[in-house]
Structures are given as C-alpha cells and as structure tokens.
Amino acid sequence: MPTLNMVQAINLALKEEMQRDKNVVLLGEDVGKDGGVFRVTEGLLEQFGSERVMDTPLAESVIAGAAIGMALYGLKPVAEIQFMGFIYPAIDQIFSHASRIRSRSRGRFTCPLVVRAPYGAGIKAPELHSESTEALFCHMPGIKVVVPSSPYSAKGLLISSIRDPDPVIFLESSRLYRSIKEDVPEGEYTIPLGKARVVQEGTDVTVIAWGSMLQRALKAVEGVNAEVIDLMTLSPFDEETILKSVKKTGRIIIAHEAVKTCGFGAELSATIAEDAMLHLKAPIMRVTGYDVVLPLPKLEDFYIPTAARIKKAIEEVMKY
Amino acid sequence: MPEKIIESYNVKRIEILDEKGNADESLMPSLSNEQIKKMYELLVHSRTFDQRALNLQREGRLGTYASILGQEASQIGSAFALEKSDWIFPSFREMGVYITMGYPLYMLFQYWSGDERGVKCPDDLNIFPVCVPVGTQIPHAIGAAMGVKYKKDKKAVVCYFGDGGTSEGDFHEGMNFAGVFKLPVVFICQNNHWAISVPLKKQTASKTLAQKAFAYGFEGIQIDGNDVFAVYKTVKEALEKAKKDNGPTFIECFTYRMSDHTTADDAIRYRSKEEVEAWKAKDPIQRLKLFMEKKGLWNANYQKDIEDKAKAAVDEAVRNEEAIEHPEPKDLFKFTYEKMTSRQIRQMKDF
Ligand SMILES: Cc1ncc(C[n+]2csc(CCOP(=O)(O)OP(=O)(O)O)c2C)c(N)n1
Ligand SMILES: [Mg+2]
C-alpha cells in the first residue's frame, strides 16, 4: 500500500474518480498546466486533457457559478479555489444558488459539485492565504462542509464528496498538505459524509477537532485518558458520536483554528448544552484562534492554537 | 433596412523609446536631463531592491515575495507622473511605485518579512497597503475618485492591477462605475502576460486589454510598458485629463514578468525559456541607458556611482529592518477595532 501525503492522496482520489466517471471535471486557476499552486492536480491535465482539466481565467465567482451550471447539466465539477481567502467572490454563487437550487426547483435541479480550497495558517504565506472561515459555510443550509485531517481520510472523504448529490465545500489544511504521510490504499473506498471518527477512545475527557487541529489535539492528550474525535464533516455534523462521548466522559474540549466568536465550536457547545447538559462534569472549553484579523507570518504562530493550549484546557476541565 | 455600423473604436498603441535607445522626438514628453537621470536612478534603485528581496527570501530572511523584474518602467514611469497628493491603490507587485513615491525602503522589507507594521503608510503619502485579493482594490479606487469629485479636489486616483485582474467581476463593475460617474481615475494595468501559470491568451479572447475600456465608455490605450517615456507621457496626460474632470482612462502597459510569479512559484513548469529570452532584449533599463549614453547623460562612472548608492541605500534599509524588534504578540489584538472588545482583552491575557 503506498504511503502518501495529503497532496498525493487527494490527487489520487481525483484521478480515480475521473477514471471511473467521465462526467467528473476539474476547473480552477492554475489547476492544469501548473498542476495547482500546491500541485494537488499535478498530472491530471496530461492524463485527462484540457476538456476535463480546465485552467480558467482569474474569476472565482464564475468558477463557482459555472460549476453550478455544469452540475445542473449533469456534470460532476470539482472546482478549486486557490486559497480559502479568495473564496469570497464565489460566496454569492455558493450561498444564493448552490445551496438552494434543490429547494428552489423542488428537487427538479440539483447541484452535485465540490469546491475544494486550501485553508488555514502555518505556511508563512501572505495576507488572506491562511484563513479558516469554515463556519461561514456551515451557517448555510444546503451546503455540506468537509474538512479532512489526514491523507487516508482526505481520499475517502473526497470520493464521497464527489459522489454526493449535494454541494460540498472541501477544505484542505495547507499546513498538513506535505507534513504527514500515511498508508492510503489504491482503488476506491469511501468515508461517509456526516460521520465523525473516534480516533482514540478514552474515559476522562473528550477533545473534538478537525482538519489542522487534529494532530495538535492528539499531542495534547498524551498521557491523558482522553477520547479524541475527528469531526471530518462539519455540516451536517455527527451529533450522535459527540453526544455519546459527552455521556461517557462528561468533559469536552473543542479545538479549532478559526476565531472563537461564532466559530463552529459555538454550534457544538450549544448542541451539547442543549442535549447533554446534565452529563457534563465541567464547563465546555473552546481552544481556538483569537478574535483578530489573521496576522502575517511573524505573528501567525501566536495565533494558531497550540497543543500546549489544548493541554492547559484539559488540565482546567480535569479540576472538576 | 441595410445593416449599419453604429459604433467602432480604434485602439492606440504608444511607443517612444525603442530597444536601441532611440526616442521618437515628436512624441517625447518634456523632461529635463535631471528628470531623466532621476528616472534612471529610480529604475536602478528598484531593481537593486528587487534583487535583494529575492536574495533575502532565498536565505529565509523574507517571506514569499513578488518580483517586479522587467516591469520597472511601467511602475517608475507611471509613479513619476504622480504627485504626492494623488491617491494610489496598488496590488501586490508595485514595489517600484512605492519606491518612486518615497516610501521608506526598510518598511517594504518589513512588510515582505511578514510584519504588518511595514504597510503603515507615512502620513505624507496616500498609497494604500498591498492588496492581495486580485482586482478587489479597483472598487476602492472608484470610491476614492468619487470622493475627489465630490470635494472638487485637484487630485487624481490611480489604480494598479494585472492582466489577470481584468477577469474579475470587480474590474468590470469598477470600470462601469468609472464610465458612468466620469471619475478622475487612471487605471494602470500591467499586462505582464502571465497570471501565475495562465498566459494572456487564456485570460481573455480580446486582442488587447485596452479595448475593454471602450465598452465602458472611455478611452483605453496600449503602451509599451518597457518604455519609461511612453509610460510617463501617457499617464501624465491621463492624470491631467482626470484633474480637469474629463473622466477616466485605462492604460494597458504591455510588459513582461521576467521572474517567477512569486518566490513560491516555478515558472519553468509552464513557460518556455525562449519566450523569456525574447523579452530580455526589451529590458526597460537597458534601453534608457542607451538613450542617455547617446545624449551624453550616461557613462560607466555614473553607472558605478548610482549602483553604489542604490546598494548602500538597500543595505541600510535591510540593516534598519533587521534591527527592529519582533512584533509583540499583543499586537495581534490592537487593530481589529478602535477599542478592543472585552473578549479580546481577556484573550490577550494569554500573552
Ligand atoms: C481573488 C484572488 N484569487 C486568486 C489569487 C491568487 N493569485 C495571486 S496573484 C494571481 C495572478 C495574478 O495575475 P495578474 O493579475 O496578471 O497579476 P501579476 O501577478 O501578473 O502581477 C493569483 C491567481 C488572489 N491573490 N486573489
Ligand atoms: Mg499578470
């Protein structure tokens, strides 16, 4: 079984899905000849040709909007937005149309598309190359939001996303792209959307994380009898797995890279408070980015939640 | 009824200084010898800065950097026509503009090293911070030009962007506003023929970028962007037109990105060496040098002198920048709002 990093695993998922289904097409800025600025689509232009791997003009709104049109017409577009910070021009299309065409047409038309984008800080990039604004998309019914944390899950989740009948925002941590490797089987396997993964079982405290924060969460729980949940799909999220864990450990830490206020941790906390309040032994704690504009490289390490901060939160809740 | 042609447009191209350093005297802008030398020095200075930035990046002392190599005439020529009171909305590849306007060099290094304090523009300049999302500064230039018009100020607004920027909705919406409101704005589009790996012909099916302006009801002009005289003259006239309230102008500087897109890019993957070589012959600095030599304004001693001065200025800027203490983590919180929120004050206690 090949050992792949995240870039290679995502590339493999795209390649296999394109081989399987000729309606799967890719579009985006620099995805063809250059193979994407992170090389995620490397080699696909050569293999599938420019009719299926489209270098587009520099226009995010049309990249998303055209993906909608393609999806309506029966194609399975996978659009790349070069960095999550550049998705904003596409939000009108995603929010006003992709999210509601099924509803607007009472199911006559649907939008099975995927918008992939690298997200997150930690690669010393210029402004707006480090955002993690996943919660924006979770606030929009009709959109699914998937955030893989490892090469294996990235491949399985991307295949599921491409096959999903609804629009999926698929966020790839640019910090993880080449920093972790894992065995990734060739050939198709899927990981269902809407299901979380219990990465490690434990009894004393639960740490919920996704994407870029999972590694730090795992480091933070070393030496603690902790359960670690990789949420994987944020919308719709796996309430069952979370509530089960709350009932087991009674102590909850949520770690995310996005700013605290209205981050996705807020939704998880509220859900836990609503549905499992009486099982809690300690206040829910969120370890998140600060409520600030994401800094340039010199300060970014101070922004990103560290394993030490998660560890401190664990110590806090263990006092109860 | 017979078909009729109801509108047609002609797109002008302006060239003054050729690759051999010969200038078309009938088109030459009025520039004193001192001004020409000053322009030359700014070109050399900008290139010295640019090369140092690339070196520092390689050594890990700067973050990702977007080189201006090859585009110096478009930047210096246009900025040379500006007054300090004019307003400038750059993208991210305009270090030559900042340098010409007198922006402190060490602050440019500071910005590219990943320290936001470097983009706090000095009070006597109206140059906006680097704008990273492509094309999104165009609407700001529109709004500033609406302000100029409203206040009846004798100022113009210039907006810089690239060929790739012309594909974004903000470009089209902004151009339309400029035409409708007849705004005192000059659009300077550096057509460097590439948007990362996407060549101009995949960016637009239009033969020129200049022609796009006509659709919005104002003039677009293509100029040789490696010809500092053509750039200076065209921009100067467009600024005068703007200041007389005669509306916007779109200027396509026909130039070439000689470097990789940024230090994070590798252009060998998508473009040929031959194409790059062919543009080397059009170097903007070389041709001005040849011109000056013919006029007796250039000799080897002068060259050495200005190179030494440029190097010394850049050395000093690097030293000054590296002597600045690392920004404080508390700095993260200080500019989100005028006053920090109570939640931010609590979060800041982590530091
Ligand atoms: C809205 C947006 N999308 C994508 C990017 C990533 N990106 C940075 S520069 C660039 C190409 C810009 O090309 P052009 O406008 O021609 O300017 P140049 O880089 O050639 O100066 C791209 C795609 C971005 N910064 N902003
Ligand atoms: Mg360009």
Image (cartoon, rainbow, N blue to C red):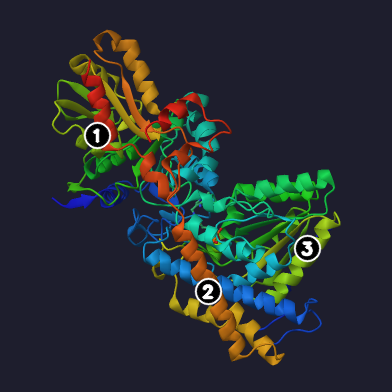
**At x 26% / y 22%, what residue is drawn?**
A316
Q: Residue A217 shows which numbered tag?
A: 1
Dot 1: element: helix
Q: Are marks 1 and 3 on the same chain?
A: no
Q: Residue B238 shows which numbered tag?
A: 3
Res. A251 image quadrant: top left
Dot 3: element: helix
Spot the residue most to the top: A278
**At x 44% / y 35%, what residue is drawn?**
A111
Find the distance from the CA under tag 3 to the CA under tag 2: 35 Å
Q: Residue B123 shows which numbered tag?
A: none
Amino acid on which the number 3 mark rests in the picture: Ala
* Residue B245 shows up from this direction: yes
Residue occupied by mark 2:
B312
User: Where residue B327 sits: x, y (%)?
Assistant: 45, 47
Mark in the foreground, 2 or 1:
2
- The chain carrying label 3 is B
User: Where residue A44 sits: x, y (%)?
Assistant: 34, 57
Dot 2: element: helix
Sequence-first tag of 3 and 2: 3
